[in-house]
Image: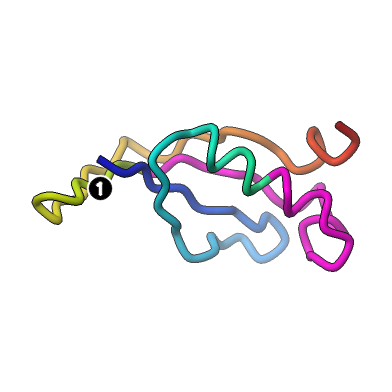
Amino acid sequence: MMQIYAIKDKATEAFHNPFFVRARGIAMRMFMDETKNEQSQINKHPDDFELHYIGDFNDETGQIQQTNGTEMIAKASDLINL
């Protein structure tokens, strides 16, 4: 089972392409790395970006199970100075 996450850009009111990971901690680490990357838009505009959990992907059956809405996991602005 894989978890599906996407980064929401509040300035454009849209989600970036979803990505798939095995655990929430991996998604958090990837998002935190982008907050520290001085070349990324997330680092340059931390108030605009949030990490959202959007569902699960069964990598054995190919089925996607969505949640009711998205679950905001972290805001870039809360992570940038950690």
**In the rendering, at what x and y percent does residue 17 appear?**
48, 65
Assess disc 1: are there few (<14), some (14-19) or many (≥20) residues with their C-alpha within 10 Å of its C-alpha. Answer: some
Q: Residue at x 79, y 65 (%)?
A: 40
Which amino acid, mark 1?
Answer: Phe
Q: Residue at x 12, y 49 (%)?
A: 60
Of 63 and 13, the residue lying toward us: 63
Q: Quadrant of residue 34?
A: bottom right
**In the rendering, at what x and y percent does residue 1 appear?**
25, 40
Span highlighted in magenta in the image: 32-54
Where 7 sits versus 75, above or below? below
Question: Farthest left residue?
Answer: 61
Q: Residue at x 60, y 38 (%)?
A: 28
Of 25 and 75, the residue lying toward us: 25
Question: Which residue corresponds to mark 1?
Answer: 57
**In the rendering, at what x and y percent does residue 80 appear?**
85, 41
Looking at the rendered structure, the secondary structure element under dot 1 is strand
**In the rendering, at what x and y percent does residue 42 appear?**
77, 57
Q: Quadrant of residue 16?
A: bottom right
Where 39 sits versus 47, above or below? below
